């Protein structure tokens, strides 16, 4: 006993049933894979669309959460290919293209050793010349330097 298309369609969950009534299944390539114009007959309900007359954007008809729910329901029934392209990746697509060892290959915040050595040299020079740099910026600092030199202990 094989089901006809109408019987199979009637057995879908209500959410999918209502979606396919509004947006009948078409081949995957007929839907736009991103934002488009409002008057476009192949516009995607999961992406925002632009009104060319006013220049304003209309938000997507189905939010990301609702599109994810629809996709997951369709996946259970094996008809996810009939849905328009979604803005997010799900399941196999997400894990097939993932860079698993990216954190090990290029750890975040790591600088090259040569750059670090150069940075430390500049820092040491700046510390050595700090009194001169401060004296340029603040003329009263010279008096403080003279007092320091006078108070230096001579016993060692």
Image (cartoon, helix red, strand yellow):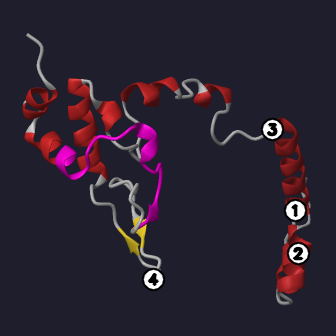
- The residue to which callout 1 is attached is 126
Q: Which residue is mark 2?
A: 133
Q: Nearer the viewer, residue 144 or 116?
A: 116
Circles 1 and 4: CB distance less than 8 Å? no
Q: CA distance from mark 3 to mark 4?
A: 53 Å
- Occupied quadrant, residue 138: bottom right
Q: Earlier in the sequence, mark 1 or mark 2?
A: 1
Circle 1 Cα neighbour tier, 10 Å, few/some/many (<14 / 14–19 / ≥20): few
Asked if the residue under mark 2 is in contact with the one under mark 1, i.e. CB atoms within 8 Å, the reply is yes
Residue bounds of the magenta highlight? 19-37
Q: Report, in whole angstroms, how far the alpha carbon at label 3 lies from the one at label 2.
A: 29 Å
Residue under numbered circle 3: 112
In this rendering, is residue 62 above or below 132? above
- First along the sequence among labels 3 and 1: 3
CA separation in Å, label 1 and label 2: 8 Å
Q: Is residue 96 magenta?
A: no
Residue 81 is drawn in which quadrant? top left
Instruction: Identify which residue, 83 or 129, lies in the foreground.
Output: 83
């Amino acid at each position: 006993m094989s089901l006809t298309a109408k019987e199979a369609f009637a057995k879908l969950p209500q959410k999918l049933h209502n979606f396919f009534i509004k947006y009948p299944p078409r081949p995957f390539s007929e839907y736009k894979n991103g934002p488009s114009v409002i008057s476009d007959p192949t516009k995607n309900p999961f992406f925002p669309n632009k009104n060319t007359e006013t220049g304003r954007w209309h938000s997507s008809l189905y939010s990301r959460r609702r599109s994810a729910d629809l996709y997951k329901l369709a996946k259970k029934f094996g008809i996810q290919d009939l849905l328009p392209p979604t803005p997010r990746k799900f399941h196999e697509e997400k894990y097939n293209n993932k860079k698993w060892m990216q954190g090990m290959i290029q750890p975040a915040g790591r600088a090259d050793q040569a750059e670090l050595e150069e940075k430390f040299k500049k820092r040491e020079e700046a510390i050595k010349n700090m009194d001169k740099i401060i004296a340029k910026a603040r003329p009263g600092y010279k008096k403080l330097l003279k007092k320091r030199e006078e108070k230096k202990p001579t016993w060692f």
